[in-house]
Image (cartoon, rainbow, N blue to C red):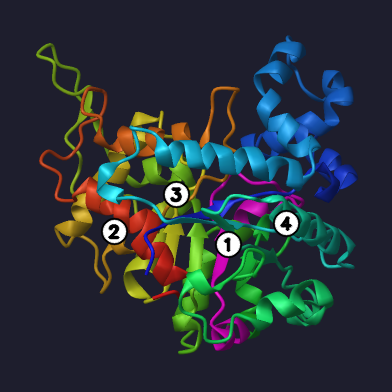
């Protein structure tokens, strides 16, 4: 099999795919940073009323790359993105432990913004993405999307029989090697609870996905693009614990990626650190306690990853500049190696690489390379003495990197 590099979480939708009125309505008074980042460029004419920001021009300029991505057609975005990726792969900074990459697989997540009604926005998004895939001339980057589905629809999976999807999904029966798939083949399903549904209510739908063996990616962090006031409650991973604990053996085999691993906030909330300022150069926050906060979102996800065979979590949109989250992430992996968490599966075998591109485009200097190096170099950085990290760490970070970008995604996508 070729040597793959797989990004399990990115997007290629545009302003044309977003329900603008409903988004602006929800945006007023929203404190959620992801929702504001996504919708702010599109409500800029009203921003003086909606946001207490003094220097709007500076804010817009700093988000130029992000805004321009959404104002362009996907076909215009895919070419520079593939160029960024190829530059990253060919750079001297690319980790030698990953070897020479034969092929990159991107799995852009199509969003179903139609909120339980018709599927016109979904159809339009799929058509534009198809044109983007046709525009991709890179021989090394393959685009294999996930299609967004709102499970509130009575005809949930029937829409996949329409001409936009019929051919794509038909080729998935019995596939094993991605080398045999052409760009544009849909690999699985994307669920986004913040649009207004609680995942506990759709077990028959999940059973059907299990029967088809389609992988699922579901949004699983507090920050979200939300279209309902209960978005955080609907997104809480404890809902998934209830789904899995219901006892249906079919659902126990659901192949699912809990996107964002609870987010950097969820990861930070999982760990306990004690403030211990010292004059001898030791850590400001140390004495990591032997237990974790069981109520945090990431703790809930750890239980899901440890106890079910096909559960995974990507680290898309992880804020690698937040040292508390980096330290907590390392401690979680370290404690898992020590056998701290009950369950049959190791966490390092369940984590996936994902960028959430373009949502993570912070400024003009942000590239695919800075996202990747920021995360993995952040894990290896021992110069910051703010939060104590395990030393020696029981997890080999180079091995973890290989698992996250290749081995684990191949299993999640049912290629191995």
The mark nearer the N terminus, 2 or 4, is 4
**Label 3 – label 2 distance at C-alpha:** 12 Å
**Label 1 – label 4 distance at C-alpha:** 27 Å
Q: Which residue is mark 3?
A: 315
Based on the displayed image, in which of its 4 quarters is residue 215 positioned? bottom right
Label 2 neighbour load within 10 Å: few <14, some 14-19, many 20+: many
Q: Which residue is mark 4?
A: 134
Based on the displayed image, in which of its 4 quarters is residue 125 positioned? bottom right
Label 1 neighbour load within 10 Å: few <14, some 14-19, many 20+: many
Q: Is residue 282 left or right of residue 34?
A: left
| Label placed on residue 348 | 2
Residue 142 % position (x, y): 57, 58
Label 3 neighbour load within 10 Å: few <14, some 14-19, many 20+: many
Q: Nearer the viewer, mark 1 or mark 2?
A: 2
Badge 2 element: helix
Q: Quadrant of the C terminus?
A: bottom left
The mark nearer the N terminus, 1 or 3, is 1
**Label 1 – label 2 distance at C-alpha:** 20 Å
Residue 229 % position (x, y): 73, 50
Taking the image as drawn, is residue 120 in sight?
yes
Q: Nearer the viewer, mark 1 or mark 4?
A: 4
* Magenta segment includes 208: yes
Tell me where the magenta segment starts and ends, as one range: 207-233
Dot 3 and dot 2 residues touching (CB under 8 Å):
no
Q: Is residue 192 above or below residue 69?
A: below
Q: Which residue is mark 1?
A: 218
**Label 2 – label 4 distance at C-alpha:** 35 Å
Taking the image as drawn, is residue 358 in sight?
no
Dot 2 and dot 4 residues touching (CB under 8 Å):
no
Q: Is residue 12 above or below residue 114?
A: above
């Amino acid at each position: 099999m070729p040597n793959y590099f797989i990004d399990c979480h990115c997007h290629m939708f545009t302003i044309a795919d977003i329900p603008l009125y409903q988004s602006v309505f929800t945006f007023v008074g929203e404190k959620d940073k992801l929702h504001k980042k996504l919708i702010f460029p599109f409500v800029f004419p009203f921003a003086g009323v909606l946001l207490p920001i003094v220097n709007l021009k500076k804010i817009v300029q700093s988000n130029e790359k992000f805004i321009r991505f959404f104002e362009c057609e996907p076909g215009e975005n895919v070419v520079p993105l593939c160029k960024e990726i190829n530059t990253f792969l060919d750079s001297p900074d690319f980790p030698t432990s990953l070897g020479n990459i034969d092929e990159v697989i991107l799995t852009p997540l199509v969003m179903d913004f139609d909120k339980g009604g018709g599927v016109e926005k979904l159809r339009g998004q799929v058509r534009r993405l198809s044109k983007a895939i046709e525009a991709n001339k890179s021989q090394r980057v393959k685009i294999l999307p996930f299609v967004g589905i709102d499970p509130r629809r009575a005809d949930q999976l029937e829409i996949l029989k329409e001409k936009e999807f019929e051919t794509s999904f038909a080729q998935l029966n019995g596939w094993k090697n991605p080398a045999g798939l052409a760009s544009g083949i849909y690999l699985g399903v994307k669920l986004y609870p913040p649009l207004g549904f609680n995942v506990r209510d759709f077990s028959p739908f999940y059973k059907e996905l299990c029967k088809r063996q389609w992988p699922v990616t579901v949004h699983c962090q507090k920050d979200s693009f939300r279209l309902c006031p209960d978005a955080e409650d609907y997104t809480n991973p404890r809902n998934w614990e209830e789904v899995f604990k219901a006892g249906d053996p079919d659902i126990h085999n659901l192949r699912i990626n809990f996107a964002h691993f609870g987010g950097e906030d969820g990861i930070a909330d999982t760990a306990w650190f004690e403030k211990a300022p010292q004059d001898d150069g030791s850590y400001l926050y140390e004495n990591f306690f032997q237990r974790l906060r069981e109520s945090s979102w990431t703790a809930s996800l750890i239980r899901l990853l440890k106890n079910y065979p096909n559960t995974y979590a990507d680290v898309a949109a992880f804020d690698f500049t937040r040292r508390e989250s980096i330290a907590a992430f390392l401690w979680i992996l370290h404690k898992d190696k020590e056998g701290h968490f009950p369950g049959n599966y190791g966490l390092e075998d369940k984590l996936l690489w994902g960028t959430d591109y373009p949502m993570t485009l912070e400024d003009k200097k942000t590239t695919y390379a800075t996202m990747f190096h920021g995360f993995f170099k952040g894990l290896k950085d021992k110069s910051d003495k703010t939060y104590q990290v395990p030393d020696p760490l029981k997890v080999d970070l180079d091995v973890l990197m290989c698992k996250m970008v290749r081995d684990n995604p191949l299993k999640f996508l049912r290629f191995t």
